[in-house]
Amino acid sequence: MSASHPPGEQESSSNESGDVLQLPMAPRATDIALHELEIVYAFIYARVGNRADAEDLTQQVALKAIPRLREGAAASAIRGYLFATARSVLGGFWSTRLGLSEAELHEDLALAVPPTPPSEERADTVQRILAELSDNYRRVLELRFLHGYSLKEVAAEMHSTVGAVKVMQLRALRAAAKVKME
Amino acid sequence: MNKPENRVDKIVSDLLHGRRLKLRGGDAEEKAAITAAARLVAARQGPQRMNPAFRKRLEQALESAPTAPWLTRRAALVAGFGLAAGAVTGGLLSRVMEPDVVATRVAGGDPIDPIPGRWVDVAAMSDLVEGQGQRVAAGSVSAFVFRRGDSVTAVSSICSHLPCQLWWDGGHGLLECPCHPASFTPQGISTDKTYPLPALNTVHVRITPAGRVEVLGTD
């Protein structure tokens, strides 16, 4: 990496009258990457659904990618590299945890780089998924995932048994997996 | 507890309580349901930002992380890392072999020059189908060879991004990486225009007077 100033430090030079001119410095690739990692984190979290795994995976991405960034690289190039690394890390995560070959995960890795930070529009993703499901499947996922009901509570609400609700939940999740989420 | 609905419900409960994904090999059959559950939990919570404490830890980790020197696959091979070692030390290799994508890389990868190298008979010229990749192994050097008329070319069969074994997609005429969406031409050039990977290493190949194809590999 080329020499650079610490974040926020400004390069200074003197003019003829002795006044100090504050010249803005281009941000370091590492600083750009740290900013972009917020988006990477949201991207990863949206796929693993929990903070601990999302933090581990984001750190893996950072430690893999950032030392290899070239100073002066465009933010878009840095983002592209970070997301390419994130895809690899996510692929490794699922293949390791599920014992799948990486070839089986190919479709999971074909994820586009988000052009902008995730917006609040994503918040209605659940509703869009649920809208595609049959009434029973939608109901069980609504109660379980949106209202945080236990299985027993869902069973009582749906006048069913815990065992039947478990099976319905599994089938509903399989159906939800087929709904295009992007 | 071994029934899939029980396993998936355990995972759902963990996710709803903010716990990690604790998966086992047998859960692969329910991969679609598990990933859907993870996405539903995440979507319910909306876009997440990094916790400030985590961000601070991340910055500290980056400051203390050594900047590993670039290690080419050629160097890895010369240093004694074979394919088997690559599998064992995948984490290490994936770390040091990450491409400096942002930096400019020369198209047409460096040749693999194993030391000591040995010419290994891999096929008969007549066995190769015009324009179709044929995977061969010459000791620790694994390659795809391509016949073009009376000549033969060869490139490494290991992706230039992660140490994954490429496969030949005859329909599209490309080498595909199973580890991420990346593909290469028979000349080893990355097909992705927006995120071009380094070119695959070339592999020395020759045709003997007897019509045999030999690749420069290792014992």
Image (tube, rainbow, N blue to C red):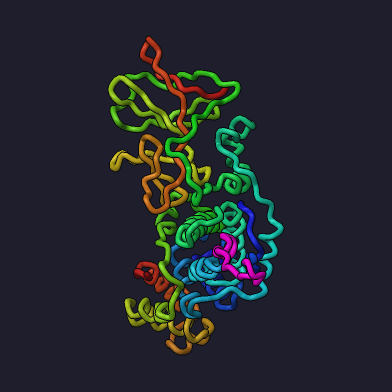
Residue under the image location 44 percent in, 57 percent down: A109
Stretch of the chain drawn in magenta: A16-34
Point out the residue furthest to the right here.
B64
Whole-percent x, y for residue B188 in the image: 40, 37
Q: Quadrant of the N terminus of chain B?
A: bottom right
Residue under the image location 59 percent in, 34 percent down: B75
Left or right position of A15 against A47:
right
Task: Name above or below for residue B164 compared with residue A127.
Answer: above
Left or right position of B78 against B9:
right
Whole-percent x, y for residue B131 in the image: 30, 31
Along the viewing direction, whichever of B135 and A68 lies nearer the viewer: A68
Residue under the image location 40 percent in, 57 percent down: A110
Left or right position of B128 against A35:
left
Q: Quadrant of the C terminus of chain B?
A: top right
Can see residue B28?
no
Label tally: 0
Point out the residue furthest to the top here.
B209
Along the viewing direction, whichever of B19 and A162 lies nearer the viewer: B19
Whole-percent x, y for residue A57 in the image: 58, 62
Whole-percent x, y for residue B48 in the image: 53, 76
Task: Name above or below for residue A80 compared with residue A135.
Answer: above
Can see residue B134?
yes
Which quadrant of the view contains residue B145?
top left
Which quadrant of the view contains residue B149?
top left
| Residue B166 in magenta stretch | no
